[in-house]
Amino acid sequence: MWQAYRWRWGRRRLLARALAKRRQLRVVADRTSSIAPGAVLAFLCLRNEAQRLPYLLQHYRGLGVDHFLVVDNGSDDGSDALLSGEPDISLWRTDASYRLARFGLDWVTWLQIRHGHGHWCLTVDADELLVYPFWQTRPLPALCHELARRGRSSMAALMLDLYPKGRVGDTPYRAGDDPLDRIDWFDAGNYTIRRQPGQDSLWVQGGPRARCFFADAPRRAPTLNKLPLVFWNRRHVYLNSTHAALPPRLNRAYDDDGGEQLSGALLHTKFLDQIVTRSGEERLRGEHFANSALYDRYYEALTENPTLWTPQSTRYRGWRHLEALGLMSRGGWI
Protein backbone atom coordinates (compact mmCIF):
# COMPACT_ATOMS: atom_id res chain seq x y z
CA MET A 1 0.00 0.00 0.00
CA TRP A 2 2.88 2.36 0.79
CA GLN A 3 4.49 1.65 -2.59
CA ALA A 4 1.19 2.26 -4.38
CA TYR A 5 0.83 5.56 -2.52
CA ARG A 6 4.35 6.60 -3.55
CA TRP A 7 3.75 5.74 -7.20
CA ARG A 8 0.45 7.61 -7.21
CA TRP A 9 2.10 10.79 -5.95
CA GLY A 10 5.09 10.27 -8.24
CA ARG A 11 2.76 10.02 -11.21
CA ARG A 12 0.99 13.24 -10.23
CA ARG A 13 4.33 15.01 -9.88
CA LEU A 14 5.43 13.93 -13.36
CA LEU A 15 2.12 15.01 -14.87
CA ALA A 16 2.51 18.39 -13.19
CA ARG A 17 6.01 18.71 -14.66
CA ALA A 18 4.62 18.07 -18.13
CA LEU A 19 1.94 20.69 -17.59
CA ALA A 20 4.58 23.25 -16.63
CA LYS A 21 6.98 22.36 -19.47
CA ARG A 22 4.29 22.80 -22.13
CA ARG A 23 5.19 26.50 -22.16
CA GLN A 24 8.53 25.61 -23.71
CA LEU A 25 6.83 24.27 -26.86
CA ARG A 26 6.14 26.47 -29.85
CA VAL A 27 3.62 25.27 -32.45
CA VAL A 28 5.05 24.93 -35.95
CA ALA A 29 2.22 22.92 -37.55
CA ASP A 30 -0.82 21.74 -35.61
CA ARG A 31 -2.98 19.31 -37.58
CA THR A 32 -4.37 17.44 -34.58
CA SER A 33 -7.92 18.43 -35.52
CA SER A 34 -7.66 15.77 -38.24
CA ILE A 35 -7.08 12.96 -35.73
CA ALA A 36 -10.04 10.58 -35.96
CA PRO A 37 -11.42 8.43 -33.14
CA GLY A 38 -9.48 5.17 -33.00
CA ALA A 39 -6.46 6.59 -34.84
CA VAL A 40 -3.06 5.09 -33.98
CA LEU A 41 -0.70 7.89 -32.96
CA ALA A 42 3.10 8.09 -32.92
CA PHE A 43 5.03 10.43 -30.59
CA LEU A 44 8.65 11.42 -31.15
CA CYS A 45 11.15 13.88 -29.74
CA LEU A 46 14.14 14.40 -32.02
CA ARG A 47 17.07 16.59 -32.98
CA ASN A 48 18.91 16.63 -36.31
CA GLU A 49 17.41 13.46 -37.79
CA ALA A 50 16.89 14.58 -41.40
CA GLN A 51 18.91 11.61 -42.61
CA ARG A 52 16.75 9.03 -40.84
CA LEU A 53 13.34 10.66 -41.18
CA PRO A 54 12.35 9.62 -44.75
CA TYR A 55 12.67 5.90 -44.03
CA LEU A 56 11.35 6.26 -40.47
CA LEU A 57 8.13 7.84 -41.73
CA GLN A 58 7.82 5.29 -44.52
CA HIS A 59 8.19 2.42 -42.04
CA TYR A 60 5.61 3.67 -39.56
CA ARG A 61 3.15 4.78 -42.19
CA GLY A 62 3.41 1.28 -43.60
CA LEU A 63 2.65 -0.12 -40.16
CA GLY A 64 -0.52 1.96 -39.96
CA VAL A 65 0.33 5.05 -37.92
CA ASP A 66 -2.37 7.63 -38.67
CA HIS A 67 -0.76 10.74 -37.19
CA PHE A 68 2.68 11.74 -35.91
CA LEU A 69 3.11 14.24 -33.06
CA VAL A 70 6.72 15.42 -33.06
CA VAL A 71 8.82 17.69 -30.86
CA ASP A 72 11.86 19.12 -32.63
CA ASN A 73 14.53 20.05 -30.08
CA GLY A 74 16.55 22.70 -31.89
CA SER A 75 17.40 20.93 -35.14
CA ASP A 76 19.63 22.81 -37.56
CA ASP A 77 19.81 20.19 -40.34
CA GLY A 78 16.39 20.84 -41.91
CA SER A 79 14.46 18.25 -39.89
CA ASP A 80 11.77 20.77 -38.97
CA ALA A 81 11.31 21.89 -42.58
CA LEU A 82 11.04 18.27 -43.71
CA LEU A 83 8.35 17.54 -41.10
CA SER A 84 6.29 20.72 -41.15
CA GLY A 85 4.88 20.19 -44.63
CA GLU A 86 3.60 16.65 -44.12
CA PRO A 87 -0.22 16.40 -43.80
CA ASP A 88 -0.12 13.61 -41.17
CA ILE A 89 2.40 15.36 -38.90
CA SER A 90 1.87 17.92 -36.14
CA LEU A 91 5.09 19.62 -35.12
CA TRP A 92 6.25 21.60 -32.10
CA ARG A 93 9.68 23.13 -31.60
CA THR A 94 11.73 24.00 -28.54
CA ASP A 95 15.32 25.06 -27.89
CA ALA A 96 15.07 24.28 -24.16
CA SER A 97 17.24 21.68 -22.43
CA TYR A 98 16.47 18.11 -23.42
CA ARG A 99 18.03 16.80 -20.20
CA LEU A 100 16.09 19.18 -17.94
CA ALA A 101 12.85 18.12 -19.64
CA ARG A 102 13.45 14.53 -18.49
CA PHE A 103 15.18 13.81 -21.79
CA GLY A 104 12.16 15.06 -23.74
CA LEU A 105 9.58 13.10 -21.76
CA ASP A 106 8.00 16.19 -20.20
CA TRP A 107 7.22 17.59 -23.66
CA VAL A 108 5.95 14.29 -25.05
CA THR A 109 3.86 13.64 -21.94
CA TRP A 110 2.06 16.95 -22.40
CA LEU A 111 1.20 16.03 -26.00
CA GLN A 112 -0.02 12.63 -24.83
CA ILE A 113 -2.19 14.24 -22.16
CA ARG A 114 -3.62 16.65 -24.71
CA HIS A 115 -4.02 14.37 -27.73
CA GLY A 116 -3.30 10.73 -26.81
CA HIS A 117 -6.17 9.98 -24.42
CA GLY A 118 -8.23 7.07 -25.71
CA HIS A 119 -5.78 6.17 -28.49
CA TRP A 120 -3.18 3.48 -28.95
CA CYS A 121 0.04 5.49 -28.79
CA LEU A 122 3.44 4.49 -30.11
CA THR A 123 6.34 6.35 -28.49
CA VAL A 124 9.71 5.81 -30.17
CA ASP A 125 13.03 7.48 -30.89
CA ALA A 126 14.01 8.42 -34.43
CA ASP A 127 16.52 5.55 -34.54
CA GLU A 128 14.00 2.84 -33.52
CA LEU A 129 12.01 0.72 -35.97
CA LEU A 130 9.29 -1.41 -34.38
CA VAL A 131 8.73 -4.94 -35.64
CA TYR A 132 6.37 -7.54 -34.17
CA PRO A 133 4.90 -10.90 -35.21
CA PHE A 134 3.36 -10.76 -38.71
CA TRP A 135 4.17 -7.03 -39.00
CA GLN A 136 4.49 -7.16 -42.80
CA THR A 137 0.89 -8.38 -43.20
CA ARG A 138 -0.88 -7.26 -40.00
CA PRO A 139 -0.79 -3.49 -39.42
CA LEU A 140 -0.85 -1.78 -36.05
CA PRO A 141 -4.66 -1.63 -35.84
CA ALA A 142 -4.72 -5.44 -36.03
CA LEU A 143 -2.04 -5.69 -33.35
CA CYS A 144 -3.88 -3.23 -31.10
CA HIS A 145 -7.13 -5.15 -31.58
CA GLU A 146 -5.39 -8.37 -30.56
CA LEU A 147 -3.90 -6.75 -27.46
CA ALA A 148 -7.29 -5.32 -26.49
CA ARG A 149 -8.93 -8.71 -27.04
CA ARG A 150 -6.48 -10.14 -24.51
CA GLY A 151 -7.30 -7.39 -22.03
CA ARG A 152 -3.89 -5.78 -22.37
CA SER A 153 -3.13 -2.05 -22.48
CA SER A 154 0.53 -2.23 -23.49
CA MET A 155 3.12 -4.22 -25.42
CA ALA A 156 6.78 -4.64 -24.56
CA ALA A 157 9.69 -4.71 -26.99
CA LEU A 158 13.40 -5.44 -26.72
CA MET A 159 15.63 -2.70 -28.11
CA LEU A 160 17.95 -4.65 -30.41
CA ASP A 161 21.19 -2.85 -31.33
CA LEU A 162 22.08 -3.39 -34.99
CA TYR A 163 25.57 -2.76 -36.38
CA PRO A 164 27.63 -3.29 -39.56
CA LYS A 165 30.30 -5.91 -40.09
CA GLY A 166 33.08 -3.33 -40.36
CA ARG A 167 33.74 -0.08 -38.57
CA VAL A 168 30.55 1.75 -37.68
CA GLY A 169 31.48 4.91 -39.57
CA ASP A 170 32.66 3.28 -42.79
CA THR A 171 29.32 2.20 -44.28
CA PRO A 172 27.69 5.17 -46.06
CA TYR A 173 23.97 5.70 -45.56
CA ARG A 174 21.72 7.92 -47.69
CA ALA A 175 18.40 9.38 -46.62
CA GLY A 176 15.54 7.14 -47.67
CA ASP A 177 17.55 3.91 -47.73
CA ASP A 178 16.54 0.99 -45.55
CA PRO A 179 19.01 1.06 -42.62
CA LEU A 180 18.97 -2.73 -42.51
CA ASP A 181 20.73 -2.73 -45.87
CA ARG A 182 23.71 -1.19 -44.03
CA ILE A 183 23.49 -2.54 -40.47
CA ASP A 184 22.08 -6.05 -40.12
CA TRP A 185 24.12 -7.74 -37.37
CA PHE A 186 23.24 -8.08 -33.68
CA ASP A 187 24.14 -9.90 -30.47
CA ALA A 188 21.86 -12.89 -30.02
CA GLY A 189 22.50 -14.04 -26.48
CA ASN A 190 24.48 -11.87 -24.06
CA TYR A 191 21.53 -10.39 -22.17
CA THR A 192 20.81 -10.18 -18.45
CA ILE A 193 17.30 -9.83 -17.03
CA ARG A 194 16.32 -8.63 -13.59
CA ARG A 195 12.88 -8.00 -12.21
CA GLN A 196 12.08 -4.59 -10.77
CA PRO A 197 9.52 -5.53 -8.07
CA GLY A 198 8.28 -2.03 -7.31
CA GLN A 199 7.59 -1.22 -10.96
CA ASP A 200 6.42 -4.72 -11.96
CA SER A 201 8.83 -4.51 -14.90
CA LEU A 202 11.84 -6.35 -16.27
CA TRP A 203 15.25 -4.70 -16.57
CA VAL A 204 17.21 -6.00 -19.56
CA GLN A 205 20.82 -5.11 -20.35
CA GLY A 206 23.43 -6.47 -22.73
CA GLY A 207 24.10 -6.36 -26.45
CA PRO A 208 27.08 -4.76 -28.19
CA ARG A 209 27.08 -1.59 -26.11
CA ALA A 210 27.40 -3.54 -22.85
CA ARG A 211 30.00 -5.83 -24.43
CA CYS A 212 32.18 -3.14 -26.00
CA PHE A 213 31.75 -0.02 -23.85
CA PHE A 214 30.63 -1.17 -20.39
CA ALA A 215 32.44 -4.48 -19.94
CA ASP A 216 33.98 -3.28 -16.65
CA ALA A 217 30.68 -1.80 -15.38
CA PRO A 218 27.80 -3.81 -16.89
CA ARG A 219 25.21 -2.35 -14.51
CA ARG A 220 25.79 1.04 -16.17
CA ALA A 221 25.07 -0.30 -19.66
CA PRO A 222 21.99 1.08 -21.45
CA THR A 223 18.61 -0.41 -20.57
CA LEU A 224 17.06 -2.38 -23.42
CA ASN A 225 13.53 -3.20 -22.24
CA LYS A 226 10.93 -0.79 -23.58
CA LEU A 227 7.18 -0.31 -23.54
CA PRO A 228 6.60 1.55 -26.81
CA LEU A 229 2.92 0.77 -27.44
CA VAL A 230 0.30 1.80 -24.86
CA PHE A 231 -3.43 2.41 -24.92
CA TRP A 232 -3.15 5.89 -23.47
CA ASN A 233 -5.00 7.52 -20.65
CA ARG A 234 -4.29 11.13 -19.72
CA ARG A 235 -3.25 9.91 -16.26
CA HIS A 236 -0.51 7.67 -17.66
CA VAL A 237 3.13 8.71 -17.67
CA TYR A 238 6.47 7.22 -18.62
CA LEU A 239 9.05 7.00 -15.84
CA ASN A 240 12.33 6.96 -17.75
CA SER A 241 12.37 6.97 -21.53
CA THR A 242 9.84 4.25 -22.43
CA HIS A 243 11.50 1.66 -20.19
CA ALA A 244 8.70 1.76 -17.61
CA ALA A 245 5.41 3.55 -17.07
CA LEU A 246 2.92 4.44 -14.36
CA PRO A 247 0.58 3.05 -13.23
CA PRO A 248 2.74 -0.10 -12.74
CA ARG A 249 0.13 -2.43 -14.26
CA LEU A 250 1.23 -1.17 -17.68
CA ASN A 251 4.63 -2.79 -17.10
CA ARG A 252 3.19 -6.28 -16.66
CA ALA A 253 3.86 -7.06 -20.28
CA TYR A 254 5.72 -10.32 -19.68
CA ASP A 255 4.42 -13.51 -18.08
CA ASP A 256 6.27 -14.47 -14.92
CA ASP A 257 4.83 -17.98 -14.68
CA GLY A 258 6.69 -19.52 -17.60
CA GLY A 259 4.30 -18.44 -20.36
CA GLU A 260 4.86 -15.93 -23.13
CA GLN A 261 3.13 -12.65 -23.92
CA LEU A 262 2.86 -11.10 -27.36
CA SER A 263 5.92 -8.83 -27.74
CA GLY A 264 8.02 -7.09 -30.36
CA ALA A 265 11.46 -5.65 -31.00
CA LEU A 266 12.75 -2.14 -31.62
CA LEU A 267 15.45 -2.41 -34.26
CA HIS A 268 17.93 0.19 -33.01
CA THR A 269 19.67 1.88 -35.95
CA LYS A 270 21.94 4.08 -33.85
CA PHE A 271 25.12 2.73 -35.45
CA LEU A 272 24.83 4.25 -38.91
CA ASP A 273 27.84 6.14 -40.25
CA GLN A 274 26.89 9.50 -38.70
CA ILE A 275 27.30 8.08 -35.19
CA VAL A 276 31.02 8.93 -35.19
CA THR A 277 30.63 12.69 -35.64
CA ARG A 278 27.40 12.90 -33.63
CA SER A 279 29.00 11.21 -30.62
CA GLY A 280 31.54 14.00 -30.39
CA GLU A 281 28.78 16.60 -30.57
CA GLU A 282 26.62 14.89 -27.94
CA ARG A 283 29.57 14.52 -25.58
CA LEU A 284 30.04 18.29 -25.68
CA ARG A 285 26.31 19.00 -25.29
CA GLY A 286 25.96 16.68 -22.27
CA GLU A 287 22.21 16.38 -22.82
CA HIS A 288 21.67 12.63 -23.09
CA PHE A 289 22.55 11.22 -19.68
CA ALA A 290 21.79 12.35 -16.13
CA ASN A 291 25.47 12.00 -15.22
CA SER A 292 27.17 12.68 -18.54
CA ALA A 293 30.68 12.35 -17.09
CA LEU A 294 30.07 8.62 -16.57
CA TYR A 295 29.57 8.25 -20.33
CA ASP A 296 32.59 10.19 -21.55
CA ARG A 297 34.46 6.96 -22.30
CA TYR A 298 31.45 5.67 -24.23
CA TYR A 299 31.34 8.74 -26.47
CA GLU A 300 35.12 8.78 -26.82
CA ALA A 301 35.13 5.15 -27.96
CA LEU A 302 32.45 5.90 -30.57
CA THR A 303 34.41 8.85 -32.00
CA GLU A 304 37.26 6.39 -32.64
CA ASN A 305 35.08 4.57 -35.20
CA PRO A 306 35.01 1.14 -33.51
CA THR A 307 34.09 -2.26 -34.89
CA LEU A 308 31.26 -3.93 -32.95
CA TRP A 309 31.11 -7.07 -35.09
CA THR A 310 32.66 -10.32 -33.85
CA PRO A 311 32.63 -13.88 -35.23
CA GLN A 312 29.85 -14.57 -32.72
CA SER A 313 27.59 -11.86 -34.17
CA THR A 314 24.27 -12.93 -35.72
CA ARG A 315 22.78 -11.62 -38.94
CA TYR A 316 19.21 -10.34 -38.79
CA ARG A 317 16.82 -12.50 -40.81
CA GLY A 318 13.40 -11.26 -39.74
CA TRP A 319 10.96 -11.49 -36.87
CA ARG A 320 10.61 -15.27 -37.00
CA HIS A 321 14.35 -15.53 -36.46
CA LEU A 322 14.10 -13.26 -33.42
CA GLU A 323 11.25 -15.37 -32.07
CA ALA A 324 13.30 -18.55 -32.51
CA LEU A 325 16.09 -16.92 -30.49
CA GLY A 326 13.66 -15.99 -27.72
CA LEU A 327 14.01 -12.24 -28.26
CA MET A 328 10.32 -11.66 -29.05
CA SER A 329 7.13 -13.74 -29.06
CA ARG A 330 3.86 -14.10 -30.91
CA GLY A 331 2.34 -15.26 -27.60
CA GLY A 332 -0.04 -17.65 -29.33
CA TRP A 333 -1.15 -15.15 -32.00
CA ILE A 334 -1.86 -17.15 -35.14
Image (spheres, rainbow, N blue to C red):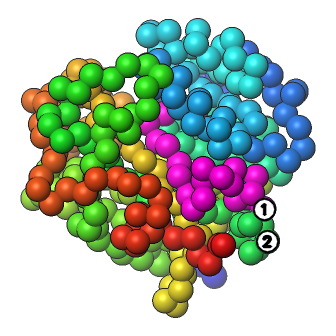
Query: Is 27 left or right of 126, judged from the image as shown?
Result: right
Q: Amino acid at mark 2?
A: Arg
Which segment did they paint magenta? 126-145
Is 140 magenta? The answer is yes
Q: How many labels sit on residues?
A: 2
Q: Amino acid at mark 1?
A: His
Whether residue 119 appears in this view of the structure is yes
Q: Residue at x 74, y 75 (%)?
A: 150
Residue that carries the numbered disc 2 in the rendered image: 149
Q: Quadrant of residue 71?
A: top right
Callout 1 touching callout 2 (CB < 8 Å): yes
Q: Residue at x 44, y 10 (%)?
A: 77
Whether residue 232 appears in this view of the structure is no
Q: Position of residue 318 (x, y in %)?
A: 44, 55
Residue lying at the far bottom of the rendered structure:
257
Q: How far is mark 1 from mark 2, CA to CA?
A: 6 Å
Classify the position of the C terminus by image quarter.
Answer: bottom right
Q: Is residue 276 above or below residue 250?
A: above
Q: Residue at x 59, y 30 (%)?
A: 58
Front-lying residue, 235 or 172: 172
Badge 1: few (under 14), some or many (20 or more) residues near its Cα, within 10 Å? few
Q: Position of residue 64 (x, y in %)?
A: 71, 42
Query: Is 27 left or right of 55, judged from the image as shown?
Result: right
Residue that carries the numbered disc 1 in the rendered image: 145
Q: Position of residue 86 (x, y in %)?
A: 69, 17
Q: Residue at x 45, y 68 (%)?
A: 323
